[in-house]
Image: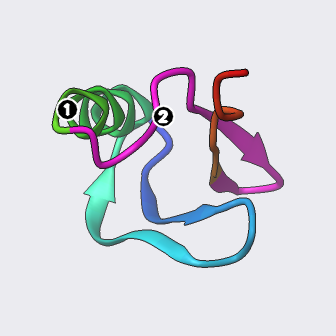
Amino acid sequence: MTLAFHHIRHADGRAYYDGRPLTLADAHLMLNDDILRRAVRPGAYLRLERAELILESASPAC
């Protein structure tokens, strides 16, 4: 059975994605695309919290 995620939120609670169900692999591809488009900082990652995906933003470079 493959898990599917309808919602992905930022760690601060804002919505990152709300739409058709995504597999974890699809969610990672979407995140990589957003990093390439500079919509998300490089170093951001997805983590699983209970049954929900959370987008953790990368810290700004020092």
Q: Is residue 55 above or below residue 38?
A: below
Q: Nearer the viewer, residue 1 or 3?
A: 3
> What amino acid type should be assigned to the residue bearing mark 1?
Asp
Lateral position of residue 11 relative to residue 27, left or right: right
Image position, residue 47 (x, y; %): 70, 37
Q: Which residue is mark 2?
A: 1
Which residue is found at the position 83% from the left and 54% from the top? 50
Image position, residue 32 (x, y; %): 30, 26
Q: Nearer the viewer, residue 7 or 40?
A: 40
Question: What is the number of the mark on residue 33?
Answer: 1
Label 1 neighbourhood size at 10 Å, few (<14), some (14-19), many (20+)? few
Q: Nearer the viewer, residue 45 or 36?
A: 36
- Considering the numbered disc 1 on the image, is that residue within a helix, a strand or a loop? helix
Of all residues, the one furthest to the front in this rendering is 62
Specify the segment rendered in magenta: 38-53
- Residue 2, located in which quarter of the rendered image? top left
Q: Nearer the viewer, residue 13 or 6?
A: 13
Q: CA distance from mark 1 to mark 2?
A: 26 Å
Q: Tell me whether circle 1 and circle 2 mark residues in contact (CB < 8 Å).
A: no
> What amino acid type should be assigned to the residue bearing mark 2?
Met
Lateral position of residue 9 relative to residue 6, left or right: right
Lateral position of residue 34 relative to residue 11, left or right: left
- Considering the numbered disc 2 on the image, is that residue within a helix, a strand or a loop? loop
Of all residues, the one furthest to the right in this rendering is 50
Residue 47 shown in magenta: yes
Residue 1 shown in magenta: no
- Residue 56, located in which quarter of the rendered image? top right
Label 2 neighbourhood size at 10 Å, few (<14), some (14-19), many (20+)? few
Which residue is found at the position 31% from the left and 31% from the top? 35
Q: Earlier in the sequence, mark 1 or mark 2?
A: 2
Which residue is found at the position 26% from the left and 39% from the top? 38
